[in-house]
Amino acid sequence: MPDPSILDLFTPIVPENKWHPNFARIKSGASIPEIDVLNRWAHGFRDRDGKFVKEFQTTFNSSFWELYLHALFCEAHCKLEQSHSRPDFVIIGGPLGQFTAEAVIASNPKQHLPEWAWDPTQPPLPREDMLDLACLRLSQAIVGKHNKWTTGYSSLPHCSGHPFVVCVCPFDQPWASLQGTEAIDRVLFKGPRPVVSATSGEPRVLGRTVSSHVFKPSGASVELGIFTTPKYSAISAVIFSSLATWSKVHALSDPAGRLMLFNGARLFGDGLKLFVEKGGDYVENIEDGAHIFLNPFAKLPLDPDPFFELGLGVHLFAHDGTLTRIPRRGLLIGRNATEIRDPSEPTKPHSPPAGATPHVPALPPDGTPFAGPSSSPFATEVTLELHRGWTLYVGRDPIDKDWCVLGKRLICRSLNVFVNAEMEPDDELMTSFLPTRDAAVAAARHQIAAMEASRDTLP
């Protein structure tokens, strides 16, 4: 007799033409050890609305992420209260303490390539393009859960007085696992990072920069830094993993006679260590690759120590760069699983939906400050803005407090790209130092108009 505590995830209850591509891939090629892993994740999971199996087979990713979280909390010996239909998790005891949590995924926008449409013969998007989309979708997912909490869930008796955690996983594009924590760090903490000049020999750190906004195709801005303002104080923390993927299932399953290779990287206190290991020798735990980001403005703070002891990376906000506590086993920051097959059986790309396109980052409207405020020994309150095909670097002298603009005739979406772009003299400008930001920007625009007029009169 089937064990009633385990959901029957794999007996189809919908027609095959409605299967999600990931579920179809499992049905066509998953081994018994991989299915055993998912069945272990589902052990004790209660389908409270009677729709979970159907959603697992038709939409997959959100259900997969919820199963992973259930397994993670069970592995941590949390006591789960599953009699309530919402939120997704109510933790009423155990080593991690008491809190409530909602699971959410970042999905691809309509008409964009879904995560399952990866092509092993093609490279992923350029990194900044990948992070741009990831920031847009992660921000939308987290803010949506914040709004649900503040307008409804927080008033439920079993939620009142307990920390609220948003658990998010990116499925927003092919190769989404490669984003690591860089996008979520920008979404929550603005991603403080160095500005590095590499134009003249040895790289030099020129200052610090942050990501303050990303932009929708409409030109509307999405503000980053959710945890740098009290506006989202209802969220105590965010649990995140970009590595809770099918490769995680491979890593936790018996290779069962197949040749599997795992390659990736772990971060330790003394540096980064790369690895390539064979299935059967490689060891990965369910918590590897999971992170928790603490909200410094949380109304109900969460104690990070038990999560650190469990093995999660713990991230804390600091103005000069995110502080990360690295677990004793190291922090798994990247991992890929590859099955070595007979070369006569090439890996086939997964055909994308008709009309689906890769993400193309939107540019901010001319005159909209972005990529800051950043700083260096030479300028503070630095931002970028665009004007008629030019990128303007607007900064304030830290001593005299007056303003100056540097300009380059190209489009830059980050300060690092701007400082490393080598230009011809006719494609650069610098204004005088002026008493206000507006005056300096106006002077730069005047110079651009004069330079373009001069070009127009050339024979």
Image (spheres, grey):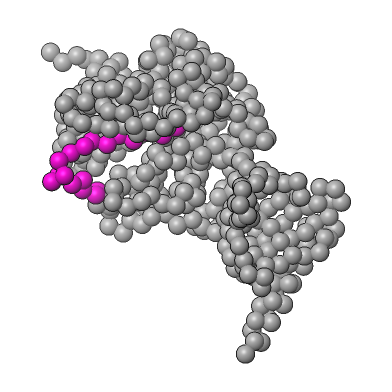
Q: Quadrant of residue 394?
A: bottom right
Residue 331 appears at what percent x and percent y?
A: 47, 26
Relative to residue 254, is residue 188 drawn left or right? Answer: right
Q: Which residues are magenta?
A: 333-350
Q: Please name the residue shown 16% across and 15% down the image.
A: 2
- 57 is higher (above) or lower (below) than 418: above
Residue 201 appears in the rendering: yes
**Could you tell me what secondary structure mostly forms the magenta stretch?**
loop
Q: Position of residue 213 (x, y in %)?
A: 59, 48
Nearer to us in this view, 86 or 173: 173
Q: Position of residue 255 (x, y in %)?
A: 21, 26
* Residue at the image point whose x is 26% and y is 26% from the top: 279
Q: Is residue 165 magenta?
A: no
Q: Residue at x 71, y 61 (%)?
A: 406
Residue 168 in picture, x, y percent from top left: 45, 33
Residue 337 on the magenta span: yes
366 vs 395, left or right, is left
Q: Residue at x 31, y 24 (%)?
A: 282
Tell me the quarter of the picture where residue 276 sits.
top left
Furthest-front residue in this view: 201
Placement of 408 over or under 458, stated as above or below: above
Is residue 356 or residue 181 the one in the foreground?
A: 181
Point out the image quarter for the N terminus.
top left
Number of dots carrying numbers: 0
Q: Does 248 sit left or right of 131 as displayed?
A: left
Work out which quarter of the rendered image holds the C terminus and state it: bottom right
Closest to the observer, 61 or 189: 189
Q: Is residue 70 visible?
A: no
